[in-house]
Amino acid sequence: MERVLREGAFAGETHIVSGAGQGIGRQVARALAAHGAAVALVDLDEGRLRETAAQITGEGGAEPLVVPANVAEEEQVGRAVARVLEATGAIHGLVNVAGITRDSRITKKSLVDFQAVLGVHLVGTFLLTREVATQHWHPLFKAAGNQPLRDGVNRFIVNFSSVSARNGNIGQADYTAAKGGIESLTRTTAREFASYGVRVNAIAPGPVNTPMLAAVGEAGIRAMAAATLVGRIAEPEEIAHAVCAIADPKLFGYATGQVFHVNGGIYLA
Ligand SMILES: NC(=O)c1ccc[n+]([C@@H]2O[C@H](COP(=O)([O-])OP(=O)(O)OC[C@H]3O[C@@H](n4cnc5c(N)ncnc54)[C@H](O)[C@@H]3O)[C@@H](O)[C@H]2O)c1
């Protein structure tokens, strides 16, 4: 994948990317790897993760760690983070991309669907955040004598919200509630993890050309493109590059607790 930052911007760092089996997550993993990061790929489907890994090695990236896991399942997340730490000894970045949709109006929405969507987005983001912190960042803080870590090491979380968190979207009571929750979780995590030297931000994309958006159908996608100011939907690579920028301490080292709106102007925050 094309590099947008200086060569080796993330050299020596390990980044976990959830949802790395397809769509935006796959492109985020490729983009971070293209800048020198060792990436750990988390998704439900091991086969798709292996495809992502093969793409990354084919592009000259370090061999990714393939870690199949359901981000909504506490034990699986705990084991996944432990595996990454065993293999690499350190985690510098976490990008919480995994997501699902189960669209239907509130009157038709089952509790099972509502909870499934919250489970993957909101609970999944919480679980990965908690496990990386309890297994790694908090112990680093303790080892430093409970003093704020100001060691110049890049540490970050990028969470995935959506334009629909602010704007609402018919059929997406669960999804928009989860994304609003993720924005709030991002702010609290930023406050709690400041002493670990971790910057915690979220990105809120507009419509992006992925299998998730394809479910909306061609007419819906055309309408969304027309509703943006730039006149098109985004490609997943563009969102991946924005994640790289937020992750880069030379570009956004002074930004934490923020939501970055990368939405083509479909909503003006
Ligand atoms: N595509 C868009 O238009 C758009 C817009 C705004 C925000 N987003 C957000 O961006 C993120 C990525 O979306 P996308 O369009 O690439 O979606 P996608 O459906 O193409 O990919 C999502 C990935 O998450 C994985 N996943 C789902 N449930 C999981 C679980 N329980 N555990 C582990 N992995 C799981 C899937 O297997 C898949 O590989 C999501 O959080 C989504 O809400 C997407």
Image (cartoon, grey):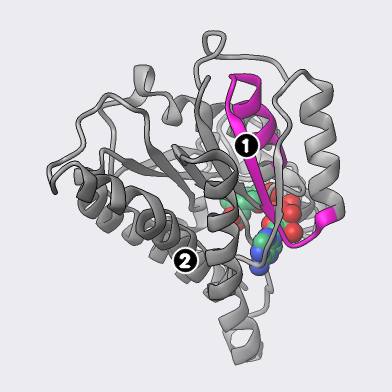
**Mark 1 falls on what kind of element?**
strand
Which residues are the magenta region? 26-46
- Residue 192 position in % (x across, y down): 22, 54
Q: Nearer the viewer, residue 112 or 37?
A: 37
* Residue found at x 61% / y 31%: 38
* Residue found at x 42% / y 60%: 182
Q: Quadrant of ligand 1?
A: bottom right
Residue type, label 1: Val
Quadrant of the image occupied by residue 79: bottom right
**Location of mark 1 (residue):** 39
Residue type, label 2: Leu
Which mark, by number, is residue 127? 2
Give the quadrant of the N terminus. top right
* Residue found at x 67% / y 78%: 104
* Residue found at x 37% / y 19%: 251
Q: Is residue 108 left or right of residue 188?
A: right
Q: Nearer the viewer, residue 265 or 206?
A: 206
Q: Is residue 45 magenta?
A: yes
Separation of marks 2 and 1 at Cα, in angstroms:
19 Å
